[in-house]
Amino acid sequence: MKDIVVKKLKERGASIEEMAELVFELQKDYLDITMDEAIQNVKGVLDKREVQNAILTGLELDRLAEEGLIEEPLLSIIQNDKSLYGIDEVLALSITNVYGSIGFTNFGYLDKIKIGIIGKVDKLGKTTDQVHTFLDDLISGIVAAACARIAHSHGDN
Ligand code: MG
């Protein structure tokens, strides 16, 4: 199951390495962390069944919307990433929820600054026929959860 999730994320434009780079960037000023540790923590997040379920659901909705296989009015809402929709964020929060309130705070921050791979897929979604309405939030959720996972493993300081 995890292999399928990793493969689908990659197909949709997000590799473990790119997500780990964000984790590393966000944590390096606070913790003594290596890129390998960032990768291991992204993988650790992807081990969770709740996380896998959220990813599979979101990626499939993006794909169906991209291929025009969802009925209106939902099709246009997802295709145009309408800001009042919000279900993409709610779904992604089910990823961070596994790691408590730290994950939630990280997610809000990432969703705003849209750095690295998050900004990349967000831009592609807005400038091409690709639909990344769920993908950008799923990536934010995975990265936020990996950061929270690291924070937990390093203790409070
Ligand atoms: Mg979104």
Image: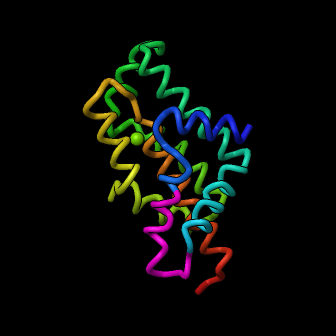
Please determine whether, in this image, residue 45 is positioned above or below residue 151.
above
Q: Could you tell me residue 74's position as x and y percent?
A: 42, 21
Q: Which residue is rendered at x = 40% and y = 27% of the image?
A: 78
Q: Quadrant of residue 85?
A: top left
Magenta stretch in the rendered image: 20-33
Quarter of the image containing the C terminus? bottom right
Count of number-bearing discs: 0
Q: Which residue is rendered at x = 42% and y = 14% of the image?
A: 68
Q: Could you tell me residue 58's position as x and y percent?
A: 54, 34
Q: Could you tell me residue 132's position as x and y percent?
A: 41, 34
Question: From the viewer's perspective, is 126 left or right of 132?
Answer: left
Q: Is residue 82 highlighted in magenta?
A: no
Question: From the viewer's perspective, is 21 left or right of 116?
Answer: right
Q: Could you tell me residue 51's position as x and y percent?
A: 65, 46
Please determine whether, in this image, residue 37 is positioned above or below residue 63.
below
Please determine whether, in this image, residue 85 is positioned above or below residue 41.
above
Q: Is residue 30 highlighted in magenta?
A: yes
Please determine whether, in this image, residue 140 is positioned above or below residue 5.
below
Q: Which residue is rendered at x = 60% and y = 51% of the image?
A: 95
